[in-house]
Amino acid sequence: MGNTSSMLTQYDIEEVQEHCNNTFSQQEIVSLYQRFCQLDRNGCGFISADEFMSVPEFAVNPLSQRLLRMLDGLNFKEFVAFLSAFSSRASLQQKVEFIFKVYDSDGNGKVTFNEMLDILRDLTGQFISEQQREEVLTQVLEEAGYAKDSLLVQADFMKILGNSSLKMEVEVPVD
């Protein structure tokens, strides 16, 4: 499974399916493997940041640099696990865990006001001022029962996002 010239066995498919909590069908895993092999241009069994940036939709994503920290050097199994958060079969918990990892830029298990502000800055660019960003973020936190100096953990994200109808879905084309 590590070398892109190899084929997936039934065992490999089932192992990957189990690793991603059955968020993808076996057919989808085969399609994802074909896409992984296309991205892994040097055939080493891992996808580099440069290879990810060759995907136009990824390259233009305002969060691409943050996502690259999570993606660089993924093997196929990790690649599928990463994408599983975007499956229609992923649980709300899986989606919130993914979002939390994007916000937790230093990986310490806590998200600060400044980390949230950085994400908001990435998403809004020059469309709103820094003061407007801070005001919006402060208001959102206060409405959720948190102060500007709160350190949010994953359970806080679940509390805030748990009542939303979070849509993070991509369709995996099956040949």
Image (spheres, rainbow, N blue to C red):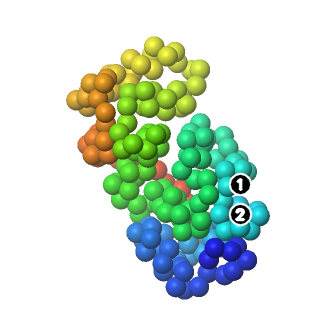
Please state if 109 lies on the left or on the right of 17 as rendered.
left
Where does the image place residue 129, in percent across and percent down from the top left?
52, 15
Q: Which residue in the protein does label 1 denote?
A: 51
Badge 2 or badge 1: first in the primary sequence: 2
Please state if 140 lies on the left or on the right of 172 as rendered.
left
Tell me if residue 164 can be seen: no
| Residue located at (77% from left, 64% from top) | 42
Where does the image place residue 154, in percent across and percent down from the top left?
32, 45
Q: Is residue 172 above or below residue 111?
A: below
Tell me if residue 18 can be seen: yes
Q: Which residue in the protein does label 2 denote?
A: 40
As shown in the figure, which amino acid type bears the numbered disc 2? Asp
Where does the image place residue 161, in percent across and percent down from the top left?
32, 43
Cα separation, mark 2 vs mark 1, equals 7 Å
Q: Residue furthest right?
A: 42
| Residue located at (47% from left, 39% from top) | 105
Which quadrant does the C terminus fall into?
A: bottom right
Q: Is residue 131 above or below residue 61?
A: above
Callout count = 2
Q: Nearer the viewer, residue 71 or 145?
A: 71
